[in-house]
Image (spheres, grey):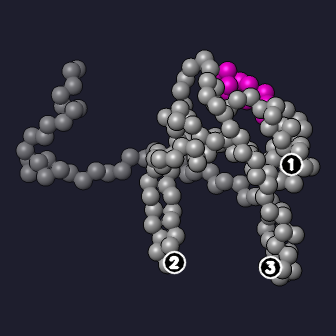
Amino acid sequence: MKVLVFVKATPKSEKGLVVDEQTKQMFADMGQFNEQLVKAGLIQDADGLKPSSFGKRVHFSGQHVSVVDGPFAETKELVAGYWIWNVKSMGEALEWAKRCPNPMPGEEGILEIRPTFEMEDFKGLVSDEQAAQEVAQRSAPKPKAAAKKAPETRAKARPKSKAKAKGKPQSNARSRRKK
């Protein structure tokens, strides 16, 4: 069974990363916890999220689509991070969640565990062919992210400024430097 474990945001987490001893200790403790999840073969993915001020919301209403820029007001409805775990049951997920260090040091941390739909949950909604296609897509190897092309190091020719073209002296940082 696959579950998403959400780390709920707090007013403090919405302010961004704070570099203090509490946060450093939380990262160390969380690193050890994540290592235990890896050794148990449960963790499929995990990440922390930047504050909602970096986010966008896309709203759909009929044919109309609109975008709202963060930050978003209701902190208790926001997510600060997540894990995706493969567990045998909700009980196993709960046992692991109870072992998690408080993700919000000095505040009330909340984890929310939500199971994902399995293909059998869609029986009667999708054809056997659609279900097989979905299973194939989910199990296909993930493409590796394309490496970003390094910027070219060769300098491009710059057009002459109007002042230089007309023979007028040009003032710039290079001509003002002390030698």
Please, what is the three-letter code of the amino acid marked with disc 2?
Gly
Spatial distance from mark 2 to mark 1, Cα to Cα? 36 Å
Q: Could you tell me which secondary element the residue under label 1 belongs to? A: helix
Quickly name the residue at label 2: 62
User: Could you tell me which quadrant the C terminus lies in?
Assistant: top left
Could you say which is closer to the camera, residue 58 or residue 152?
A: 58
Tell whether position 24 is magenta. Answer: yes
Quickly name the residue at label 3: 126
Badge 2: residue crowd in 10 Å (few <14, some 14–19, many ≥20): few
Residue 156 as seen in the image, left or right of residue 31: left
Spatial distance from mark 2 to mark 3, Cα to Cα? 23 Å
Please, what is the three-letter code of the amino acid marked with disc 1?
Met
**At x 67% / y 41%, what residue is drawn?**
7
Spatial distance from mark 1 to mark 3, Cα to Cα? 26 Å
Place of residue 127 in the rendered image (x, y in percent of width and height, measured from the top left)? 83, 82
Quickly name the residue at label 1: 90
Place of residue 99 in the rendered image (x, y in percent of width and height, measured from the top left)? 82, 31
Residue 2's mark? none
Q: Which residues are magenta?
A: 23-34
